[in-house]
Amino acid sequence: MRYLTLFLLCLVSAAATSSPRRAAGQAEGPTQVVEITAERFSFSPSEIRTKAGTTLQIRLRSDDTAHGFKIVGTDVNVELPKRGRGVVTVTFVPKAGRYTFECSNLCGAGHDFMRGTIVAGE
Ligand SMILES: [Cu+2]
């Protein structure tokens, strides 16, 4: 019984020391705020340049109808309400490389052209 108590104490202290370290690591990463406007049939800007590990805070709004914003290959996919109905903020931390984002809400004839790129350098 005493051994079990000791073992549990070790587990608790390991958890107590490791979680603050993780939290501090997250806080150290730089944050970059990006504002993107969607309208038929483009995003502007359509290219975002950043560095891997940066916390991108992407603020999206529509200038006309409802659109969507999806980063291909990630779980980022949000709906953008039509003009005047608010800003949607998405947080994304890219690894090094290129990501394609696109409209994910069928918005008209040029919907398939609504694309852009996130370029994350090393
Ligand atoms: Cu669309």
Image (tube, rainbow, N blue to C red):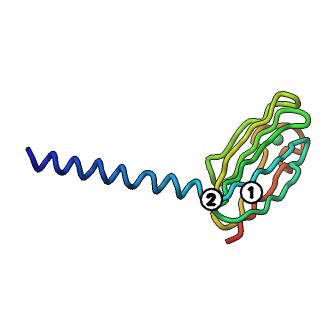
Q: What's the amino acid at mark 1?
A: Thr
Residue 109 at what x, y percent from top left? Answer: 90, 41
Pointer 1 residue Cβ closer than 8 Å to ligand 1? no
Q: Is 68 displayed left or right of 76 in the figure?
A: right
User: Secondary structure beneath disc 1?
Assistant: strand
In the image, what residue occupies the spot 75% across and 42% down?
104
Does residue 74 appear left or right of residue 39 in this picture?
left
Is the C-beta separation of discs 2 and 1 under 8 Å? no
At x 72%, y 48%, the residue is 57
At 9% from the left edge and 46% from the top edge, which residue is drawn? 2
Query: Where residue 58 sits in the image (x, y, percent)?
Result: 75, 47
The quarter of the picture showing ligand 1: top right
Q: Can you tell which of label 2 and label 1 is closer to the viewer?
A: 2
Seen from this angle, which residue lies furthest bottom? 122
Q: Position of residue 46 (x, y in %)?
A: 85, 55
Q: Amino acid at mark 2?
A: Gly
Q: Quadrant of the N terminus?
A: top left
Q: Secondary structure at mark 2?
A: loop
Residue bearing the label numbered 2:
29
Please indicate whether residue 73 sits to the left or right of residue 36 in the image: left
Residue marked by disc 1: 100
Q: Which badge, 2 or 1, is on the more N-terminal residue?
A: 2
Observer-nearest residue: 97 or 59?
59
- Of 97 and 19, nearer the camera is 19
Q: Residues within 10 Å of mark 1 (few under 14, many from 20)?
A: some
> Residue 68: x, y in percent?
77, 40
